[in-house]
Amino acid sequence: MFFPWVGLLEQMRLADVFVHYDDVQFSKGGFTNRVQIKTAQGAPWLTVPLHHTALGQTIAETRTDDRSNWRRKHLETLRQAYAHAPFGDEMIQLVRAVYDQPFATLAAISTASIEALRDYFEIGKPGEFLCSSRLGIGGSGTERVLAICRQLGAQRYVTGHGAREYLDHAAFDAAGVRVEYLDYQKRGYPQQHGPFTPFVSALDLAANCGREGREVIASGAVYWKDFLQRT
């Protein structure tokens, strides 16, 4: 994801090893290259423009389109949206530190945006942060995710809600890997521009709460059977 919502940071907080799934197929309309922020005029998207994408192209193969100065445009949008936020300047510096680096691919800039938020809020257990593209594990779907878990010696796999559409939970159980889904609390915090919403970039949390916003990043996870019974 690109400068993701708090929910992804909660997944990272629970992990001993966090794997960026950077070599899966790019999907238009997702959150890999865009995210919403909160402004007085609504919730516009910050979108990273891309060069032409071909069917089956991976996130790691997808290149950013730098013919326009979209980085400067994003920074100006953020400045205007969070001009009166207590920690707006800190948030802008966080984004600028990512944008000042010469990333050419979507995977690179999205990964950097996640890790910048991780470092800012000082979340995550001591451990590793890996990219799936460097693990040398082929396949797709359940088989590949389970193979990654096995290679890393995982006993527990924590994931977001989207995985319920494709994971073979029985295969994980048979392999001794417990699947858990995030139990999103969507904790509120002081937020500008109308009623609270959790479904915006965690940059909003940084601007409004500063580093103390880590207290909001607190959701746990539940066993897959309990999760499916709820949903």
Image: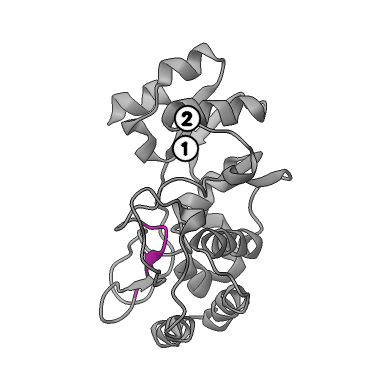
- Does the magenta segment cover residue 131? no
Can residue 140 be spotted in the picture?
yes
Residue 108 position, x and y percent, is 57, 61
- Magenta stretch: give its range: 31-38
What's under tag 2, amino acid-wise? Glu
Q: How packed is label 2: few (under 14 Cα within 10 Å), some, or many (20 or more)? A: many
The residue wearing badge 2 is 180
Label disc, if present, on residue 193 of the rendered structure: none
Q: Is residue 207 above or below residue 145?
A: below
Q: CA distance from mark 2 to mark 1?
A: 6 Å
- At x 58%, y 43%, the residue is 132
Query: 196 or 123: nearer the eye?
Result: 123
Quadrant of the rendered image containing residue 114: bottom right
Is 8 left, or right, of 39 in this rendering?
A: right
Q: Nearer the viewer, residue 143 or 82?
A: 143
Q: For the point 39% across and 22% down, which residue is it?
A: 168
Residue holding disc 1: 159
Tag 2, which secondary structure?
Answer: strand
Q: Is residue 154 above or below residue 91?
A: above
Q: Main secondary structure of the magenta part?
A: loop
Name the residue rendered at 55%, 21% in the picture: 177
Residue 37 on the magenta span = yes
- Tell me the kind of residue under disc 1: Thr
